[in-house]
Amino acid sequence: MSMRVLLKNVGLMGAGVVLAFLVGEGVVRVNTANQENYAIEMWRYAKTLKVQSQNEEIGHVHLKNAAETLQNVEIRTNSLGLRGGEPNREATYRVAVVGDSLALGWGVPEEQTLSGQLQAQLGPEADVINVGVGNRNVEQSVSHWLDVKQQISADALVVLVSPRATVEFTGRNANFLVEQSQLFALVSTSFQQIFSGEFGENALVEGYRRHWQSEEGQKVLKRAFDKLATVREEDGTDIVILSIPEPHDFNNYKFGFIGQKAQELSQAYGFQYVDPLPSLKGPPSEEFWVSESDLHFNGRAFEIVAQDVLPYLKGKNQ
């Protein structure tokens, strides 16, 4: 085969690959335009509302004064980069809800998030701010509060400790193709799930058990609680640890080791501890999900959780 023929064949092959990619990208974008594909909506969230923090301990934070409709729900941010409107600077009592995508209220309208429901219960004299950002562990969430508190104080922190609280999130940006292409984002997500080896209920249980019992996982928890202890000492802030149960099955729960560890640490540090699992038992667990493909808590779940948290907030009785 001559060099000319070889180059022609390589060119045709390259053109075919490019064409296949463009067709695949178009198909993915058309099929996910309804904003119901969880992986793609999380990809859009990272692309449109998040930016890497200058503080390496945090990972990513929200863009300030931005808004985007994700999974058919608007997420807007204020001048602090927090979900919601501007804080009420005249409030006599302020609560900060600190955590990951559950604190953010992924897939839930603003007023139905935990912070929104607490605000409604505490009334206009109180101010509840949402310091939740998706895809971070508990140490990153607490480190974020250390930055935010330089701009606004809080009388109480409700710190969500979710099942993924001990998982390492590097905060590094994805590669160019994953950042620009929904097709590559889906492929990347699929490969991550395949190579995680965590399939089925038993594998999920053991996967979380590894994270929570690992040396690195223990360090993440301890560093987060140490920072919270410093916040309480320096600012006089009440600390409420809210243990978020794994959502697959509240009625036949197999993740008790998560809440047990969170409770042990809370008692050791003298923090208030709230476990809403008993209040979520009874109905089928899927009644508390955003959707069948997205197991984040919905507004009904947050309404129940808010009622469990309220007795630990002094502003409720002021």
Image (cartoon, rainbow, N blue to C red):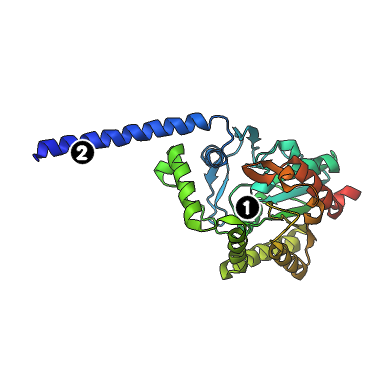
Q: Residue at x 60, y 47 (%)?
A: 134
* For residue 183, side relative to residue 256 (left or right): left
- In this view, the residue in front, 71 or 122, is 71
Q: CA distance from mark 1 to mark 2?
A: 50 Å
Residue 227's place in the image compared with 292, above or below, is below
**Where does residue 31 sit, x and y in percent of width and height?**
51, 31
How many discs mark residues in the rendered view?
2
Q: Is residue 277 visible?
A: yes
**Where does residue 203 sit, x and y in percent of width and height?**
58, 60
Closer to viewer: mark 1 or mark 2: 2
**Where does residue 160 sit, x and y in percent of width and height?**
70, 54
Which mark, by number, is residue 300?
Answer: none
* For residue 14, side relative to residue 281 (left or right): left
Residue holding disc 1: 144
Is the N terminus in the top left, top right, bottom left or bottom right quadrant? top left
**Which comes sooner in the sequence, label 1 or label 2?**
2
Q: Residue furthest left?
A: 2
Q: Residue at x 65, y 46 (%)?
A: 295
**Where does residue 94 sit, x and y in percent of width and height?**
79, 47
* For residue 85, side relative to residue 196 (left or right): right
Q: Which quadrant of the figure has residue 210?
A: bottom right
Residue holding disc 2: 10
Q: Amino acid at mark 2?
A: Val
